[in-house]
Amino acid sequence: MATEYPHAKHNMTALAPSTNVQKQRKANPKIDERQKVYWDLQGRYQEEYSSRLDALPQYGEGATKASEIFRAATKLYYDFWNNGMVNNTSGAVNFLLYAGVF
């Protein structure tokens, strides 16, 4: 029996470069009330989060320092919830340190 790979070409849908892929995801069906996270589009301030995410350019610098701080923070948030902070996130951390966030 052939192995089925989830990322095989026939299992993937092409998206336009301007598509916000985070909003294309389906919510985690195993989520409970304590785990409402932005990645599942159920965060406490989801409306504001989504509008800020939509305002970010797909590539290149954001219009303001605040937008770049938001981008760096969302990278850390994503890595924490999806990868347990095992990836090299030093770029985002260093930017936030330089920006005086913490």
Image (cartoon, grey):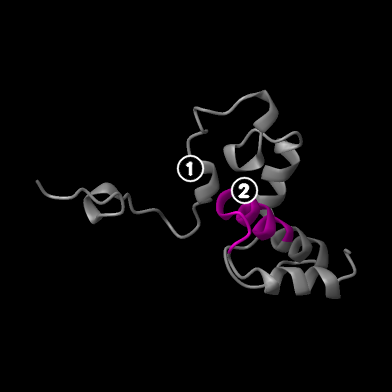
Callout 2 crowding tier (Cα within 10 Å): few <14, some 14–19, many ≥20:
few
Which residue type does callout 2 highlight? Trp
Which residue type does callout 1 highlight? Gln
Q: Majority secondary structure of the magenta segment?
A: helix
Residue 14 placement (x, y as % from top left):
34, 54
Q: Is residue 97 left or right of residue 53?
A: right
> Residue farthest to the left?
1
Circle 2 SS class: helix
Q: Which residues are magenta?
A: 73-86
Query: Mark 2 touching mark 1, by CB under 8 A?
Result: no
Q: Quadrant of residue 68?
A: bottom right
Q: Residue at x 84, y 71 (%)?
A: 97
Sequence-wise, the earlier of marks 2 and 1 is: 1
Report how far apart the C-alphas of labels 2 and 1 lie in the structure.
18 Å
Q: Quadrant of residue 36?
A: top right
Q: Residue at x 85, y 75 (%)?
A: 98
